[in-house]
Every structure is written in C-alpha cells, then in structure tokens.
Image (cartoon, rainbow, N blue to C red):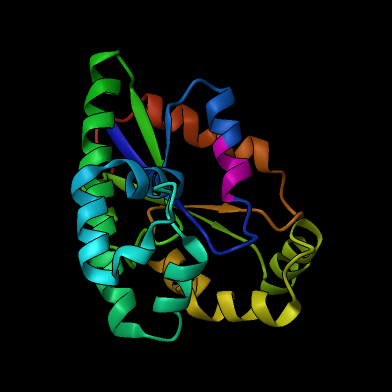
Amino acid sequence: MLKIGITGGIGSGKTTVCRLFRALGAPVYDADTRARWLMENNPALRNALSSAFGADVFDANGRLDRPYLAAVVFGNSTALAQLNGLVHPAVGADFAIWAAAQAANGATYVLKEAALMFESDSWRQLDGVIAVTAPAAVRLARVLHRDPHRSLQQIEAIMAQQLPDAEKIARAQYVLHNDGGELLIPQVLALHTRFLNTTLAPVKT
C-alpha cells in the first residue's frame, strides 16, 4: 500500500486538497488533529508532557491547557524541541497503526496530512510527499479572510517559521499548484489515478 504525505504552508490549501482526496475515497490521516487528541488521550504522552512542562499543562478537567503550553514553548527553541520530541514519535506510531488498518481494509493508498512533514522527519515513513503551494500574498489573503481573529503580524510570524515553499517543492515528489491560475481538481484527479496505478513512489533522501 502506498503512503503519501501532504504538506504546505499556512493558507496553501492542503486541507482543501485532502477533502478532494477523501471525496475520491482515499483514506486521509490528519496528523495535527491526531496530535491534539493523543496529547489528551494517550496515557504515556500525557505523563511525559506533565513531567516535561509541569502539572499545569492539563487543567482541572484533565484537558490540555493549550494557551499555557503555547506560552511555555513560544520563543523557547529548547522547550519547543522537547515538545516536538515527545509528540512527533507518538503521532508516528499512531499513524503506523492506522495505516496498517487501512491496508487490511484493502486501501490502495493512504494520505498523511501534516504541516511539519519535513521539519518533523515524518516523511521518512512515507513513499512520497505532495507539496501544496501558492504565492505568499495569496496565502496571506486567504488566512486573513479565514481567520479574522489573527492579525497580519501573527500570520506573517507563522509563515516565517515554516519551511519556505521553494524547499518544500525541492524535497517533494509531487506538487499541486493552488494559486487560482490552475484548476485544482484536475491536478488531484491526475495524482489519484497515478497512485491507484503505482506500487511505489521514489523517495528523495
């Protein structure tokens, strides 16, 4: 079974791409959503987070205190690396279990959506990666419209922290252009057909 990653910077449209693949019947694993779930529901990860960041990382109801955790790691590269070092392996193990279940159900290929595909090294679990791209100005306008609670400065700060599109494109095996100049659906359909007829995609090292 082919395992393909989907990544892209904020506002690139990778979530839209995943919806299209789901509509075609492809199983999609949302790494960011599963990471949040695991942080609250995986006992080993909960204990590790409490040990690393203190008991206050969970509120009185046992829910992850995201603002607290964000404040702890914001601007602290050591704390952020520690957090990623706990969460990313847990997500990787969870994805492996999920992918095995999809294979048992007869899936020809599956997709893993992750914003930090290359940064977290999760691409190493995969047979190929799709980079969803759009110009920075287009992405910025999309996020400003989509997330009115975010300021321009906040969005620019997020974009500055993410891997540049040029590097994503260079490292990916497949590229989807979501800039409005090229229709997205035909691009997705072409990849869907390719994955259905491919046993192994080449992985760049």
Query: Looking at the image, is 29 positioned above or below residue 62?
Result: above
The boundaries of the magenta stretch are 14-18
Quadrant location of residue 43?
Answer: top left
What residue sits 28% from the left and 48% below the top? Answer: 91
Q: How many circles with numbers are drawn on the protein?
A: 0
Magenta span dominant secondary structure = helix
Q: In the depicted view, which residue is nearer to us: 109 or 154?
A: 154
Instruction: Give how far across and how far down residue 70 sits, in percent.
Output: 47, 71
Direction from residue 18 to residue 180 in the image, left or right: right
The quarter of the picture where the C terminus appears is: bottom left
Indicate yes or no whether the magenta region holds residue 25.
Answer: no
Instruction: Give how far across and how far down residue 121 sits, in percent.
Output: 26, 61
Query: Looking at the image, is 117 positioned above or below residue 194?
Result: below
Direction from residue 124 to residue 31 in the image, left or right: right
The quarter of the picture where the N terminus appears is: top left
Instruction: Give how far across and how far down residue 30 sits, in percent.
Output: 44, 42
Indicate yes or no whether the magenta region holds residue 17.
Answer: yes
Direction from residue 127 to residue 35 in the image, left or right: right
What residue sits 39% from the left and 24% below the top? Answer: 196
Query: Looking at the image, is 42 positioned above or below residue 22?
Result: below
What residue sits 57% from the left and 49% below the top? Answer: 14
What residue sits 29% from the left and 14% below the top? Answer: 106
**Whether residue 141 can be seen here:** yes
Instruction: Give how far across and how far down residue 165 sits, in percent.
Output: 52, 70
Residue sticking out furthest to the top: 105
**Whether residue 121 can be seen here:** no
